[in-house]
Image: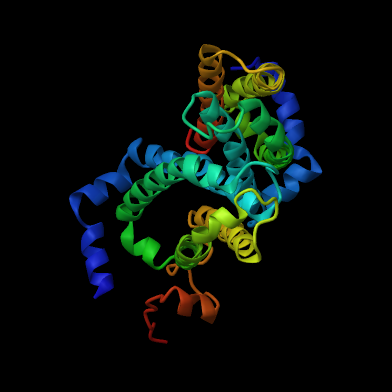
Amino acid sequence: MIRSVLEWLGNTPWSIALLESYYAWPLIESTHVLSLALFVGTALMMDLRLVGLAFPGVPASSFIDRLLPWTRIGFAVMVVTGLLLFYSSPLRYYHNLFFRIKCVLLAFAGLNIWLFHARIHTSIDAWDDVWSPPRAARIAGIVSIVMWTGVVFSGRMIAYNWFDCDIQPQPEWVNWVAQCQIQEVAP
Amino acid sequence: MPPESWIGFFEWCEATVLGTAVRNSIYAFPIIEAVHLVALCVMGGALIMVDLRLLGVGMKDQEAGHLATLVRPWLAGALVVMLSSGVLLFLSEAIKCFYNTSFWVKMTTLPIALAFTFLVRDPRITNGAPSPRQSRMLGSASLVLWFVVAAAGRWIGYS
């Protein structure tokens, strides 16, 4: 079901045009990479404050109120460019090991953000000016740093085809995780 | 483009032990590249938060000079990682870089951006508050310079 939708998507004229374009694809990819500095960069600065590794004396709310809007703008650019890149070759990315790892890490990063805003941010008045925030806030900061670093790493690795399904044989776990469709070859 | 006589140096770079080791490994280049990207995030964040403040659209309750001082160890640390990973990437494909216009754009703008950040922007904003007009000029010049460095860097792989 998913495969047939993605196969159809990859055969739409715009998808083919994007994949075969000389400048559009590299420009979109470059925008995706450069937006990392804005999105992950500003997010990491806030995480360092939450963990208590940097910015003593700067209230946490200063980051959340005045820097986070920029983090969100960076995220919006990442999502739009990322979706376009996915659209250029849906089926290939769907079966790419690193793409799948990246999606899982993104889900954890998203859950971490939701937990932070729903459970920890609500009590910010109590720890806004405290140099070392409560344990929960520090954990949220560490999880964020680890997840986004993992997202950048796995995202970069998507470009390499070491574990692509069309390169066989692969270790069994790779074929399992990437759900490779192996054609049984008659002996 | 540089004089053709420099090619000897680039050939020597590519033949170094480090360059050869990175080139001969399937995994080394991509992993170093990913480290380069993570350091880009830290460096980008450290620069952008100060530049946004200078443009008057960031953390307005903090002095730009104060932010620059606090973030400096992270900026410097990320820079060290950027330079070391960047040198490794370069050594592995030095001859390709020699014929690559984007590489030379990056190598020209990088020292300018570094000098601007550490010799112009930071000394100016840590020695008393600059006027709003000066602030905007410093912030936008920093963003433009580093954008060119980063964009040219990414384009090395495409040109």
Q: Quadrant of residue B119?
A: top right
| Image position of B93 (left or right of A69) | right
Front residue of this view, candidates A4 and A148: A148
Residue that sits furthest to the right in the current view: B17
| Image position of A72 (left or right of B37) | left
- The residue depicted at 56 percent of the width and 23 percent of the height is B142
Q: Is residue A69 above or below residue A100?
A: above
Q: Position of residue B79 (x, y in %)?
A: 70, 36
Q: Quadrant of residue B149?
A: top right
Q: Position of residue A39 (x, y in %)?
A: 49, 45
Front residue of this view, candidates A121 and B135: A121
Is any atom of residue A39 visible in this view? no
Q: Position of residue A70 (x, y in %)?
A: 45, 40
Q: Is residue B19 above or below residue B126?
A: below
Residue that sits furthest to the front in the current view: A126
Q: Quadrant of residue A32?
A: top left
